[in-house]
Image: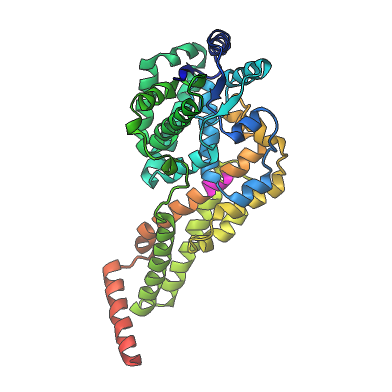
Amino acid sequence: MAELKIVGTAHVSQKSVDEVRAAIEEFHPDIVAIELDPARYSALKKQARDPTVEDVLEVRNFNSLLVQWLLSYLQRKIGVDVGVEPGAEMKIAIAEAESRGIPIALVDRDIRLTLLRFWKSMGIIEKIKMVFALIYSIAEVDNVEQQFDIESLKEQDIIDAVMEEFRRFSPNGAHALIDERDAYIAHQLILLKAQRPEGRILAIVGAGHRQGINDYIEHPQKLPPFDALAKEPKSFPWAKIFGFAVTGLFAFLLAAIAFSGVGLMVLLYALLFWIVIHGVLAAVFTLIAGGHPYSALTCFAVAWMTSLNPLLHAGWFAAYVEAKVRKPPVSDFRKIYECDSIGEMARVPLFKVVLVAALANLGSLIGTFLYFILIFPLLHIDPVTVISAGLHNMYAWASMLI
């Protein structure tokens, strides 16, 4: 029967590098399984082409990309494996295996699929909570960076505390980023054991995944179906439904005002406030992100329109203008993963393009909520009176047409 040994590591840890090297030397594996997917393996080997700003603009996954970069930054700071970026211990595992002629198995799920399932698994409230928790965690890590003991993160009680905190803020996100990958890797290791019944398999995984993988291997009946872990998630299109609902509500509001008899100026002010509130907030959030004034002006010009079209977002236009102004080089994508601080990261042009897109969209979204909250006080009219009168007059007008 195949013999399997799992080594749990902490990223950016010299001790983990030494442990990986020693494990390969002492265990004499027939195959080394590493917690990487082909995309990250190619990136580590410098075989992959870095995405260009055109690639980023075309995919338009600004929010998930921003979260990926922040997760990667947090990982580099404290060494906790969330599967975003390979660490030094993965590099040494590959180097040692290649130098000894030992085959390498890539047993992790495609990071793009993982991040897609991660982002789509969460509701809007969970996404907001998770982002704020991530920002808070980064701030805390930056504050205590000099006193932090990287090696302590391999101790199970510390790992459990970190994972529990993650689950508290984002249970669905933790399931996609941790639990599903534990199951996916366990499936791959079980398959390797079946293919090499007399072999010796050495698996190099992040310390946070070791217990979950072990549990699945010891109790394979608990494993979810492999196909369910390896396909894109189907999620209810809440964002589009919300967008169409906003469009319908705004159209209804204008119709009610128009038919209520309060006057043409009130209707024009209702339109003007929609343009100004969305434009100002989208532009202000663009500037908060460090965006160029041209990007802010673009947001101001289009936010009123994109907020009425669920298929368009103000941030897309802002990102396009920001990219034209900043002209991020291809090297920016790799440079983001090498930054030592959030401030340094924010100065990278490509990061600024993505941040501008995300915050511009957030500003426009806040503008939508504020508009429906403030519109009647701003117009100095009673909503009940206006809507009831508008509905009555619309019904009378429709009856006349019939």
The residue lying toward the viewer, choosing from 314 and 79, is 79
Residue drawn 44% across the image and 43% down it: 227
Is residue 353 rendered to the left or right of residue 386? right
Toward which corner of the image does residue 170 lie, by quadrant?
Answer: top left
Q: Is residue 12 above or below residue 166?
A: above
Residue drawn 35% across the image and 91% down it: 401
Q: Is residue 15 above or below residue 245?
A: above
Is residue 91 rendered to the left or right of residue 142? right
Is residue 160 rendered to the left or right of residue 35? left
In magenta stretch: residue 277: no
Residue 55 makes an appearance in the image: yes
Estimate the x, y position of residue 207 in percent, counting from the top left.
Answer: 45, 20
**Which quadrant, please, contains the N terminus?**
top left
Residue drawn 58% across the image and 9% down it: 25
Residue 285 makes an appearance in the image: no
**Which quadrant, please, contains the C terminus?**
bottom left
The residue lying toward the viewer, choosing from 366 and 166, is 166
Q: How many numbered marks are there?
A: 0
Q: Is residue 205 above or below residue 24?
A: below
Estimate the x, y position of residue 326 in percent, counting from the top left.
Answer: 70, 43
In this picture, which residue range is highlighted in magenta? 356-360
Toward which corner of the image does residue 13 lie, by quadrant?
Answer: top right
Please, what is the dominant secondary structure of the magenta stretch? Answer: helix
Q: How is the image coloured?
A: rainbow
Q: Is residue 50 above or below residue 275?
A: above
